[in-house]
Image (cartoon, grey):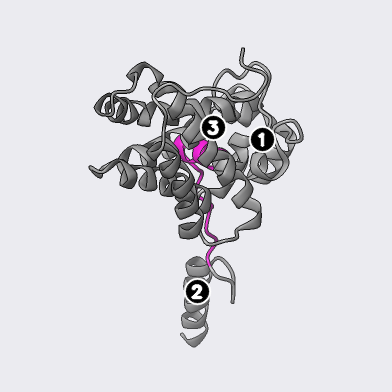
Amino acid sequence: MGAVATGGKSSAVNSGDGGEGKPPRRTRRRMTGKERREQLVDVGRTLFAARGFEATSVEEIASKAGVSKPVVYEHFGGKEGLYAVVVDREMRQLLDMVASALTAGHPRELLEQAAFALLDYIDEYTDGFRIMVRDSPVAQSHGSFASLISDIATQVEDILGLEFKSRGFDPKLAPLYAQALVGMVALTGQWWLDVRKPKKAEVAAHLVNLAWHGLGDLEAKPRLIGHRRA
């Protein structure tokens, strides 16, 4: 009776843990297609920011994600497709931040908010900004630094147009000034990305100081005083 009882006990233990002293095996859950796609976007974003588009290969992306190359092609059609998705998301993130920041009524405060929106993005989404200011594929018509500036400038163009009209200036020139102002902030932000000095608020204050006081003394019909006047 004792031997039978012991044998039964042993059998129960073995069936419960798959082997004496060993924990039960757990199978790894496979990622869904959506989860795999998000993983590849995250991996691509990190590699593109660190190495640039040209220096990043499909092999490296697949290796970092722990998948085979065909998986990358299946989801994005290749490196260019993955890059386009990464850039599109970064563009939308930045434009959303700029658009949501432009809520004040006073033009100078709007200028401050726009400067902070870009500097906040650089600070919080550093990898994304590095990707957009790096070299992009020749065939890529969107996602370049120039198109980034143009898209943000569109957000502030209407505001400048209203301000110009109230001061008796030609509102048709608002797009030109919008490009100039946003370009100034964006290029300064690109420099600040590496040096990180002075602090963000101080950088914003100096940018607004230059832009606002320049606008404060704006001539309705600017003239050239140098020898080259045409």
Residue 82 lies, with reference to residue 42, above or below; the image says above
Residue under the point 33% across and 23% down? 169
Residue 32 lies, with reference to residue 142, above or below; the image says below
Which one is nearer the viewer's eye here, 222 or 13? 222
Dot 3 falls on a residue whose secondary structure is helix
Marks 1 and 2 sit apart, C-alpha to C-alpha, by 61 Å
Report the residue marked by disc 3.
87
Q: Which residues are magenta?
A: 24-41
Q: Residues within 10 Å of mark 1 (few under 14, many from 20)?
A: some
Marks 3 and 2 sit apart, C-alpha to C-alpha, by 55 Å
Residue 128 lies, with reference to residue 227, above or below; the image says below
The stretch drawn in magenta includes residue 176: no
Report the residue marked by disc 2.
13
Residue under the point 73% across and 36% down? 56
Residue 150 lies, with reference to residue 198, above or below; the image says above
Which label number is shown at residue 134?
A: 1
Return the disc, 3 or 2, that comes first in the chain's sequence: 2
Q: Can you tell which quarter of the image residue 217 is in? A: top left
Q: Position of residue 188 (x, y in %)?
A: 58, 45
Q: Position of residue 215 (x, y in %)?
A: 41, 37
Q: Can you tell which quarter of the image residue 108 is in? A: top left
Q: Residues within 10 Å of mark 3 (few under 14, many from 20)?
A: many
Marks 3 and 1 sit apart, C-alpha to C-alpha, by 11 Å
Q: Which mark's residue is nearer the viewer, 3 or 1?
A: 1
Q: Position of residue 149 (x, y in %)?
A: 51, 30
Residue under the point 46% across and 44% down? 118
Q: Amino acid at mark 3?
A: Val
The stretch drawn in magenta includes residue 30: yes
Which one is nearer the viewer's eye here, 90 or 5? 90
